[in-house]
Image (spheres, coloured by chain):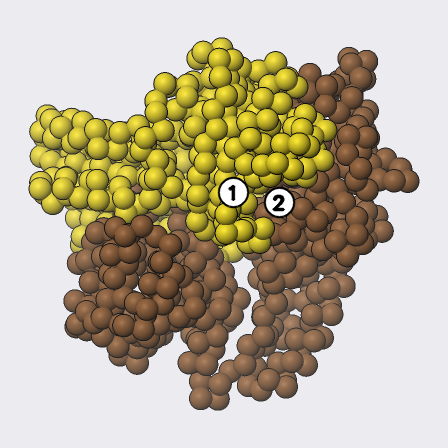
Chain colours: A brown, B yellow
Amino acid sequence: MIGEIIAIGDELTSGSVLNTTSYFAASHLFAAGHEMLAMTTIGDDPEVIGRTLQQALQRADFIVVTGGLGPTTDDLTNAAVSSALDRPSTFYPEIFKKIQAYGTSLPTGQQLSLEKLAWLPAGAHALHTEAKMAGYFLVQDGKPIFFLPGVPQEMKDLLLETVITRLAVWEGEAVRQVRQKVYKVVGLVESEINRKLAHLEGRDPRVRIGYYPVFPEVHVSLTVTGPSSQEVESVFKKYDGQMASFLGDCCYGSGRDTLEGVVGSLLAGRGQTVAVAESCTGGLIAHTLTKIAGSSAYFSGGVVAYSDALKERLLGVSREIILRSGAVSAETARAMAEGMRRVTPVDHALAVTGIAGPSGGSEDKPVGTVYFGLASPDKTQTYLFHFSGERTQVQALASQTALDLLRRHLLGLDNGCRTV
Amino acid sequence: MIGEIIAIGDELTSGSVLNTTSYFAASHLFAAGHEMLAMTTIGDDPEVIGRTLQQALQRADFIVVTGGLGPTTDDLTNAAVSSALDRPSTFYPEIFKKIQAYGTSLPTGQQLSLEKLAWLPAGAHALHTEAKMAGYFLVQDGKPIFFLPGVPQEMKDLLLETVITRLAVWEGEAVRQVRQKVYKVVGLVESEINRKLAHLEGRDPRVRIGYYPVFPEVHVSLTVTGPSSQEVESVFKKYDGQMASFLGDCCYGSGRDTLEGVVGSLLAGRGQTVAVAESCTGGLIAHTLTKIAGSSAYFSGGVVAYSDALKERLLGVSREIILRSGAVSAETARAMAEGMRRVTPVDHALAVTGIAGPSGGSEDKPVGTVYFGLASPDKTQTYLFHFSGERTQVQALASQTALDLLRRHLLGLDNGCRTV
């Protein structure tokens, strides 16, 4: 179907906040077989909201609206919709009950303003009553309009869990079936993946492949649509096998998998543990590992040895190595990893030392030069990578690479496909 | 003036590429005193391009169009503009000469297609003939329309170097002046800030206040518009003073300030240093500090003491303290901070130990209980906070709070306004 996305918020039109939700929605709607006629960003202005909605209704088959649903006085979407579509603002007790249940831990002042969230245009249906911010949809002129919160994570969850499936059902009495899988890829850039998979594209109108850089990863979606679930399932199975084969071991998982989650499961499954010794990543690897609930079962901690003094003091890296090879060197990475294993009884220790920039680079070791050490019971290995990008990008790539090196080590894979 | 931004490209509406150029343009145009009525993203479709342009001409004072100016067959902006505005496509020899000069290093096939870049709608003026991609503007219905390449860096350069200055000249006798300031707030939730500032809203039609939760912070914008810069300045000054007074020391900065940048500047300005000892934040505080280029001047590193063994081994926290008071306690936070200062010669050491969840909580110490220690040359202080939210939110709030405690300590502020 032809869709339009409308993002609402003064913070967007003033350029205070980068609009990533429209992009996310467009990419997943496109992968599910829809095309966007326009993506419009407007401020919290009821008149402009109303006019934009009216215009979209005239030319699109469905509309996704994000933002302006919150509890504060500058959230005006619901009032604007009520007025533009002539649907009186109506109190929804069931929605309020759910919101209250979530809000019991909030201070009284905030609880009161939550009531505003349950006043919606007449005819609204909650999209997902279990979610914190329900979102809603209504049907106007025979077209579905979805209203989602502007907070990126809440919007993304609702889009994936409710909007895409509801649209699939909406699309036809002959109910078109959709099957989608998102492959998570590490260590390859978008154009390389594109080259690997290009021959799978355009061979079958029921099959669509999409590429979404989610820095520092790339996500690839396979979407199969068709009239029957049997047909869809059979085509999906064939393509899924091919995707897996061509992406190879650069694909660390799918769906909601995360690299740190996959590494954590591998460690937990083996009853093994890890510690980290970080210089240029400044704690990012440790923090990424501890995003996973229960990571204390396999992660014991680490050292952020940002200064040479701490590398010596806490990790026992000898001054001689630093003087001879430099703080950014394979020798230092090795000494940091082995030092970390001496400090705490873990199976594996990851070490990273490099030049995140923007300054500190030399002709020999330009910005983006990063050495990795991985010390395990049987041996210590070191690796050299050159990353490009700004400081925070180099840090993110280095952290991702460290985790991927550990994943590959745990799975007994070589380092072959990496090209970063 | 009131502007509209139109971004053109199938790669944008399909969600293959994140549109950052509209955001960049909006933020710089806003800072220059313009307001965006809408930012529209559409595909390379001549009819949609024409209609979108016509609509923008009806309601905006100026338009910035990006994308679709390139040499390939799917670049259709110029043809669409010629047709929509009834301006025959015209060959510009001087522009072609410049393009040729740039194009001599390109292979023959590409050189030929460069001629396409010199065919523009009648009445077009090159924006910057020295640039690789010139861009152009034309005046329609008395309103300037700027056409810029979609390549982010080229677009950004042209916007800053030509569009903003040309608009300033165009505006001439100051049609409408705008002044904006974004206040960055830490330690207060959106609805609390809303309550503090609600009495400032709606009193003056020239003044607009916006609330933007950028978790874990809240940003508040003050926008003043009026007919003369003198009037705007006087209203702005009055409101700026009131905003500052009501937000108090929970406002750590404005504009492009970040909390870690402000803390870094305070440390650097005093010639002081910091190290961190983290448990539940797992390295997030260290990583946040090292996002700032040059942070090695004041940040020496730290320990991620996720396990009790590392707390003992690296920070010298006695087993007795952990057994008596627990790993999550004021005593342990104090011992971690003081231990960190013994490990490395820094002025300040921040320590965090808490329960990020989802498990590990008890009746006494529920999920979200976080103790902080701040050891400085003269004394060590400990703090207890209760945060709500999911694991990563608790971690983010704890990291932010640790940095804010250090900011407050460096500025000699009390801990009064915090309510999280």
Question: For the point 63% across and 84% down, which residue is it?
Answer: A231
Q: Position of residue A44 (x, y in %)?
A: 24, 52
Instruction: Please indicate, yes or no, whether residue A378 appears anywhere in the rendered image.
Output: yes
Q: Is residue B375 above or below residue B191?
A: above
Location of residue A135 by image quarter: bottom left
Q: Is residue B215 above or below residue A120?
A: above
Residue on which disc 2 sits: A290
Q: List the single residue furthest toward the right.
A: A378
Chain of the residue under the numbered disc 2 shown in the image = A
Q: CA distance from mark 1 to mark 2?
A: 9 Å
Q: Is residue A229 left or right of residue B226?
A: right
The C terminus of chain A, quarter of image = top right
Chain of the residue under the numbered disc 1 shown in the image = B
Location of residue B179 by image quarter: top left
Q: Which mark is residue B395?
A: 1
Q: Is residue B2 left or right of residue A262?
A: left
Task: Name the residue type under label 2.
Answer: Thr
Q: Position of residue A138 (x, y in %)?
A: 30, 74
Q: Nearer the viewer, residue A412 or A119?
A: A119
Q: Nearer the viewer, residue B41 or B295?
A: B295
Question: For the point 74% across and 18% down, which residue is it?
Answer: A312
Q: Nearer the viewer, residue B399 or A219?
A: B399
